[in-house]
Image (tube, coloured by chain):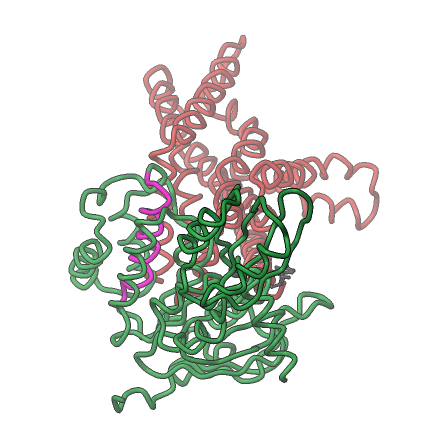
Chain colours: A green, B red
């Protein structure tokens, strides 16, 4: 542990925001220390964007308070805004401007002088690998490159705190990997809060995760622990032609199989096989079926969808709460 | 102030690289020339530019909202307002910057009409005083019209809605003086004072009345103030 980790850069205290009668976030409290990358994980409509909009001073909270670098987001909004870099979820950019003109403008309104702007624009264009596109119109760039421009403007003025709202949403897989590495590289220097609804993303990028659901914190943990908690088992679905009772017993006897349930009967039976995580029994099952002279009509490993993961997570957490 | 100028400069550049700038300029130049030629083709032509100054109020009622409609509506629609409002820029700096850019656009409309003045000096010896004061009046009138347009643009994320709304407000403010004869008593005077066109008349006659200047300045300041409040209220939604 470094010394710097004990300096709180973002302090959120009982933050609540109502849209009319509807509470988007309720009594949110957490702290992010200097140099930390905090993952803000939650399904759609959990309140991630709302929280970030309050932190950036875009909208005031209904109650509670938040401080960034010691400044209150409502009473000292301007001081807060000087110290943050923000990438909104929709990556809003001036499409009729070129990349460098846009960055220059953003630098100006962040109070950067001409020399500083010139130096930093070159730097961030390098960091975000926008070199080839520096004079392209933003409107002509692909979604992934726009995302990079969005990140470039957020880090341009070397802000102490970076607030990134779903920075990898809607871009292609290769660019997702690049963007994650980019963000990872920014930690340490900057304090980062990054929202996402993708579980693996937080394990790849963040050291600590806050999970929110329906506007409330349901878990705070290290990503390793979270994935461990979630990835208890895996499922395989198979359709096998053969005598049901014998098939069931045979499947249950395979080492690593935890549970077999028959979901459809008849000549061809469908079975749901629950296995230990990482067991990877597909080949094993097909050999078995073959040896017994049955017919294997379908074999499909089932990955838990994010929604299910969240469901299981939020259910267990709120049950225990 | 620096922020205001940065925003003004950015908007001015955006405006002048768009074809809209030149379409509007051509439309205004064409109409001004038409009214000018008509006015000096009479039996006893006067060497003045009144011919196109008065119709300009109506033309500006239509063109000013087109100049301003983009300025805040587009930012709301594209979401760029979120980045602007989370930058260390005060709301009034945003509004002033946009307004200055709109003024630059409006002034650019007047540039080609200088040609008409030159024509006039070639064929006659016009009195330059009223010409200059008429231009000054038109600039002040345009300033007021733009402030209405900017306010309308802050109310909607839809440029067309913003433009039509501004045209409506300006139209009402320009023709309200027509009701003066029906109003009677104190209302006659009130209606004449409110109208944004009546204050242009003395400028065209060559008289710069501080009372008219003050009217336009207060009118504009008030509209810009409303625009700032409208932006601020976005934070509270
Ligand atoms: N401007 C708004 N007005 C009314 N309701 C809103 C507004 N923004 C978000 N909401 C609602 O608040 C909840 C949280 O939204 P949001 O913060 O955007 O969640 P997330 O970013 O986690 O998807 C959602 O139910 C959403 O519909
Ligand atoms: Mg969101």
Residue drawn at x 40%, y 65% is A278
Quarter of the rendering occupied by the C terminus of chain B = bottom right
Q: Quadrant of residue B218?
A: bottom right
Whether residue B28 appears in magenta in the rendering, the answer is: no
Whether residue A150 appears in magenta in the rendering, the answer is: yes
Q: Nearer the viewer, residue B30 or A72?
A: A72
Would residue B18 be visible to someone looking at this image?
yes
Residue A267, compared with residue A103, is above or below; it is above
Would residue B229 be visible to someone looking at this image?
no
Q: Nearer the viewer, residue A191 or B148?
A: A191
Quadrant hosting ligand 1: bottom right
Q: Quadrant of residue A43?
A: bottom right
Residue drawn at x 36%, y 26% is B112
Q: Nearer the viewer, residue A320 or B21?
A: A320
Give percent across and percent down for residue B145: 55, 42
Q: Is residue B49 left or right of residue B62?
A: left
Residue drawn at x 58%, y 74% is A61
| Magenta span of residues | A141-157
Give percent across and percent down for residue A317: 59, 78
Give percent across and percent down for residue B19: 39, 28
Q: Is residue B53 left or right of residue B164?
A: left
């Amino acid at each position: 542990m470094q010394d710097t980790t004990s300096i709180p850069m973002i302090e959120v205290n009982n933050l609540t925001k109502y849209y009319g009668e509807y509470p988007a976030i309720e009594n949110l409290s957490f702290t992010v220390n200097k140099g930390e990358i905090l993952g803000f994980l939650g399904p759609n409509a959990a309140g991630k964007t709302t929280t970030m909009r309050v932190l950036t001073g875009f909208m005031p909270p209904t109650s509670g308070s938040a401080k960034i670098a010691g400044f209150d987001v409502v009473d000292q909004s301007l001081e807060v805004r000087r110290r943050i870099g923000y990438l909104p979820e929709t990556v809003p950019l001036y499409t009729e401007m070129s990349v460098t003109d846009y960055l220059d403008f953003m630098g100006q309104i962040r109070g950067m002088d001409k020399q500083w702007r010139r130096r930093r624009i070159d730097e961030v264009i390098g960091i975000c690998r926008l070199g080839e596109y520096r004079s392209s119109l933003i409107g002509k760039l692909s979604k992934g490159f726009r995302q990079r421009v969005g990140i470039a403007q957020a880090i341009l003025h070397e802000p102490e705190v970076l607030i990134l709202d779903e920075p990898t949403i809607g871009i292609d897989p290769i660019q997702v990997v690049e963007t994650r590495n980019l963000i990872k590289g920014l930690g340490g220097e900057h304090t980062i809060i990054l929202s996402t609804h993708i579980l693996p993303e937080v394990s790849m990028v963040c050291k600590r995760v806050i999970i929110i659901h329906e506007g409330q914190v349901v878990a705070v943990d290290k990503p390793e622990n979270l994935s461990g908690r979630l990835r208890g088992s895996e499922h395989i679905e198979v359709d096998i032609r053969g005598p049901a009772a014998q098939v069931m017993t045979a499947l249950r006897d395979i080492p690593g199989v935890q549970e077999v349930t028959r979901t459809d009967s008849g000549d061809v039976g469908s079975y749901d096989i629950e296995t230990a995580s990482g067991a990877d029994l597909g080949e094993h099952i097909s050999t078995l079926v073959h040896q017994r002279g049955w017919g294997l009509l379908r074999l499909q490993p089932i990955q838990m969808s994010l929604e299910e993961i969240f469901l299981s997570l939020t259910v267990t957490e709120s049950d225990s709460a | 102030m620096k922020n205001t100028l940065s925003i003004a400069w950015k908007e001015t550049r955006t405006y002048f690289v768009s074809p809209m700038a030149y379409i509007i300029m051509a439309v205004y130049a064409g109409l001004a020339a038409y009214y000018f030629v008509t006015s000096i083709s009479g039996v006893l032509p006067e060497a003045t530019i009144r011919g196109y100054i008065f119709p300009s109020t109506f033309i500006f009622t239509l063109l000013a909202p087109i100049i301003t409609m983009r300025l805040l509506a587009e930012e709301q629609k594209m979401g760029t307002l979120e980045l602007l409002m989370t930058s260390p820029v005060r709301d009034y700096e945003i509004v002033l910057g946009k307004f200055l850019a709109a003024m630059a656009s409006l002034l650019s409309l007047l540039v080609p009409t200088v040609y008409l003045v030159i024509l006039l000096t070639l064929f006659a010896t016009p009195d330059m005083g009223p010409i200059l004061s008429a231009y000054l009046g038109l600039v002040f009138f345009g300033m007021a019209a733009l402030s209405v347009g900017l306010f309308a643009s802050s109310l909607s994320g839809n440029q067309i809605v913003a433009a039509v709304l501004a045209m409506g407000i300006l139209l009402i403010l320009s023709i309200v003086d027509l009701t003066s004869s029906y109003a009677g008593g104190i209302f006659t005077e009130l209606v004449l004072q409110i109208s944004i066109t009546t204050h242009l008349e003395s400028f065209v006659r060559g008289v710069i009345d501080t009372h008219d200047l003050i009217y336009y300045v207060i009118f504009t300041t008030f509209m810009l103030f409303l625009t700032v409040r409208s932006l601020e209220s976005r934070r509270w939604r």
